[in-house]
Amino acid sequence: MEALDDLKTLTVEEAATLLAVRPEAIRIWVREGALEAMKWGRRLHIRPEALKRFQEDRSIQPLNPAKAVAKMRNRRTYART
């Protein structure tokens, strides 16, 4: 998860991509208090450190974190144009 240190926060979709789960699973974990998140307006944002702690607590391993981060960066680039 070293590559995540470059990102300030993650959206629900980005966190789901990293953990290889559906976004609804992330929302449920946040609602249950298992995963720490911040709400900005109507959107949830997750700090990379909180996701890392959650992974360690639950023993969840991402499939390929570097590839997932690259994929997220590409989405952000396209969204800005």
Image (spheres, rainbow, N blue to C red):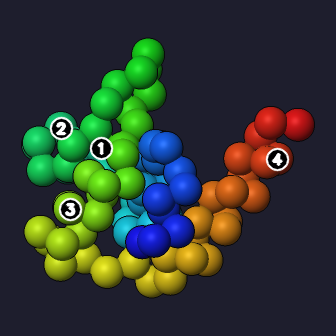
Cα gap from disc 4 to disc 1, whole angstroms? 25 Å
For the point 45% across and 83% down, which residue is it? 63
Amino acid tagged 1: Arg
Quadrant where the C terminus sits is: top right
Question: Residue 12: percent from the left, percent from the top?
Answer: 43, 46
Cα gap from disc 2 to disc 1, whole angstroms? 6 Å
Badges 4 and 1: C-beta atoms under 8 Å apart?
no
Question: Mark 3 or mark 1: which comes first in sequence?
Answer: 1
Amino acid tagged 2: Arg
Within 10 angstroms of label 3, few (less than 14), some, or many (20 or more) residues? few
Mark 4 lies on residue? 78
Quadrant where the N terminus sits is: bottom left
Badges 3 and 4: C-beta atoms under 8 Å apart?
no
Q: Is there any visible trace of residue 30 in the rendered image?
A: yes
Question: Mark 3 or mark 2: which comes first in sequence?
Answer: 2
Badges 2 and 1: C-beta atoms under 8 Å apart?
yes
- Relative depth, front residue between 72 and 8: 8
Mark 2 lies on residue? 31
For the point 48% across and 62% down, which residue is it? 4
Badges 3 and 2: C-beta atoms under 8 Å apart?
no
Question: Is residue 25 depicted above or below 39 in this figure?
Answer: below
Mark 3 lies on residue? 53
Amino acid tagged 4: Tyr
Question: Mark 4 or mark 1: which comes first in sequence?
Answer: 1
For the point 80% across and 36% down, which residue is it? 80
Cα gap from disc 4 to disc 2, whole angstroms? 30 Å
Mark 1 lies on residue? 27
